[in-house]
Amino acid sequence: MRKLLSLLICIAVVSVILSGCGNLKKAGTETSSESGGKTEEAGTEETGTEEVVADAISTVGPEDGTHLEMWTFVELHSSFYAEMLEKWNAENPDKQLNITFTTYPYADMHNKLIMANQTGEGAPDLCDVEIGQFPNFMQGEVQFRALNDVIKPYQEDIVQSRLDIYSKDGNYYGIDFHVGATVMFYNTKILEQYGIDYTTIKTWDDYAKAGEKLKEASGGKVFMTSVDTAGTDWLWLAMAEFGEDYTTEDGAPNIELDSIKTMITTQQKWLDDGIAMISPGGHVDMEEGFANIGDGNIVSFPKAMWFMSRFLNYLPEMTDTWAIAPCPVFTEGQDRSVGIGGTGTVVSNQSKNADLAAEFLAYAKLSYDGNVKVWENLGFDTLNTEIWSDDKITEDTSNKYIAYFVNNPFDTLNEIKDEIGKIKVGKINPAIAEQFNTIILNNCFESKADVNEELKTAQEALEIDY
């Protein structure tokens, strides 16, 4: 009965997530024909017995250039690639490219790529693959071109852990947009109102003491944070701090970890002590979460740096309110961050121009110019660390992200540069996430269940699935 309930909840959650992904993509979508781009109406294609409808199709580059096809599931990504393509063509007159960018719904695109790999035909030259989906493409003989050779010229400036997550047997198969470094966001106006200095918070004990002071000073009206029942960011952070991972080297589930037990037990105490609340909607990256932040009900939470764009999009009125700081740790000396999220772009072995496609991909996503665009257009913490210390970028107060926050995001990023841990993403990870997001966290926080018993039961279920 437990497994059946888990399956039913999972189906509902996945439906909501996929719906949310589509809504988010469309909310931030712009179909542009700037700089010679040709915009066409969305197309329809047949894949097997299923009809796959493209949300947008655009072609950029001269007709006499080498023709490539690229798929993505976020149209803003297409806009970024199109801009980099024009720079590429300007700098490489002997390697002109003409690329057709097609944006599909998230699930449709990944399923279509899996089908193309299985049949050995129909794959695009280039394709975005979301990090959670990437393990599905690493099974057996990988159908993507290894990217080691095109990465090498940039590698000394690239955050290595973000290359490793898209690797297998010593080969790199995907290139990401960002590091996704987890930081702590603090509402400085409320904290200052109640006499709390966030810069003195170094450990989770310090954090809890600040929460107690906030509770007393505000009469219990303001919470230090909210804990998630439908998200594992807190757990990823704890695992990075302890140097643990909830899968083994072989990819088997291993969730009965000290890091996870410690974090969940700590959060249970915060709830009992009244210094934390349960996140409305399950986690902060939801409409309910944005409203909770905007209403001033919580004053801090950990999230990857890409969450900066959420502030500008959903909480623009809170400029000069939020600061970005390293996350607290259980014991000083532990790593204070972990990389979360990502999209690894790949080159198909089916491409007739795989080498040229790979060269363009590395130029777009690893070069200095490409990473400037990633920062300016998408607001991501870039893979190329040259950007992090370039005063022209880091001190540009006209940049909307730098202007929004109380302190400079790059100051924090440089402080934790060597402390950004990684958690492996394997085939079992979606099942692990299901256990936490639909059962364990709800039971532990809503029903105050024993974390050891919950983890033991989930581990047994995962071992059967594995």
Image: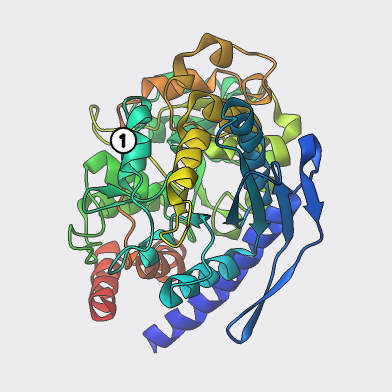
Determine the image quadrant of residue 282.
bottom right
Which residue is depicted at the point 63% across and 83% down? Answer: 50
Q: Residues within 10 Å of mark 1 (few under 14, many from 20)?
A: few
**Left or right, 211 with reference to 93:** left
Which residue is depicted at the point 62% across and 59% down? Answer: 21
Task: Give 351 or 143, whichever is nearer the viewer.
Answer: 351
**Left or right, 91 with reference to 213:** right
Q: Position of residue 411 (x, y in %)?
A: 46, 17
Mark 1 = which residue?
Answer: 160
**Left or right, 103 with reference to 252:** right
Task: Give 102 or 423, whichever is nearer the viewer.
Answer: 102
Determine the image quadrant of residue 202.
top left
Q: Position of residue 163 (x, y in %)?
A: 34, 42
Q: How is the image coloured?
A: rainbow
Quarter of the image for the N terminus: give it. bottom left
* Viewer can see residue 337: no
Q: Position of residue 15 (x, y in %)?
A: 59, 73
Callout 1: helix, strand or loop? loop
Q: Is residue 130 above or below residue 161?
A: below
Residue type pointed to by label 1: Gln
Task: Give 269 or 258, whichever is nearer the viewer.
Answer: 258
Which residue is depicted at the point 23% across and 70% down? Answer: 456
Most extreme residue toward the bottom is 1
Quarter of the image for the C terminus: give it. bottom left
Q: Position of residue 234 (x, y in %)?
A: 40, 48
Q: Is residue 444 above or below residue 228?
A: below
* Viewer can see residue 47: yes
Most extreme residue toward the left is 249
Determine the image quadrant of residue 222.
top right
Q: Is residue 196 above or below residue 314?
A: above
